[in-house]
Every structure is written in C-alpha cells, then in structure tokens.
Amino acid sequence: MLLLAPAPAWAAPGLCIGPICADEISRSAKHHFQLRMRISDQRGHRERIVIDCRNGQLSPAAGLVERGYAQAVATKACRLAGEPA
C-alpha cells in the first residue's frame, strides 16, 4: 500500500491587488500613520516600502515593482488598518 503524504500548505500572501502582493505589513513604531510592508510581483521583484497614510505617499517613490499597483495595495492596507488614506 502506497501512502501519499499531503502536499505542504503554503500561506497565502497578506494582501494582493492585480499582480502585486504585500506581506509583513506593520505599523511604524515612530509614526502611527505610517505602514511598512514588503511588496512583491509575479516576476519575483521584491522590495520594502513605507506609505504615509495621511497623504498616500509611497517611499521610495520609484522601484522595480510597478508603483500603480503598489499604491493601490498600500492604500488598501491603510484603510484596513483604520488610517485615512
């Protein structure tokens, strides 16, 4: 009798919009209105960003991950965290 072990379960990313996903989302220790997160795309590009939820500004403003989708993911994370974006 052949017993097959179940495939390992991989955790889903934190928050996805289009081809961009964010995980490791946390509030900044210094400024409560800032969220820090790691974003990645389907091509394997990864970077860490900070969003100021007061005005929706991303830092860094340019990078390998497409900023239109990164802005949408970050804005949604602000809304879910209860910060106005």
Image (cartoon, rainbow, N blue to C red):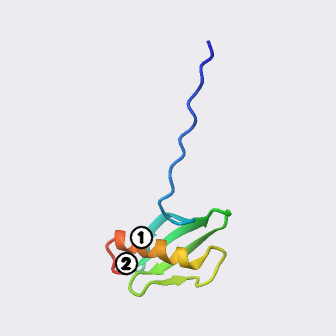
Which numbered disc, 2 or 1, marks the residue that appears first in the sequence? 2
Q: Residue lying farthest front?
A: 18
* Depth check, front residue: 15 or 19: 19
| Camera-side mark, 2 or 1 | 1
**Is 32 placed left or right of 38 in the picture?**
left
Residue 6 higher or lower than 71, as above or below: above
The residue located at (63%, 62%) in the rendering is 42
The residue that disc 2 covers is 32
Q: Amino acid at mark 1?
A: Ala
Asked if residue 71 is positioned above or below residue 13 in the image, the reply reads below
Please provide percent x and percent y for residue 32.
Answer: 37, 78
Q: Secondary structure at mark 2?
A: loop
Residue on which disc 1 sits = 77
Looking at numbered disc 2 in the image, what kind of residue is underneath it?
His
Q: Position of residue 75 (x, y in %)?
A: 43, 76
Residue 63, located in which quarter of the rendered image? bottom right
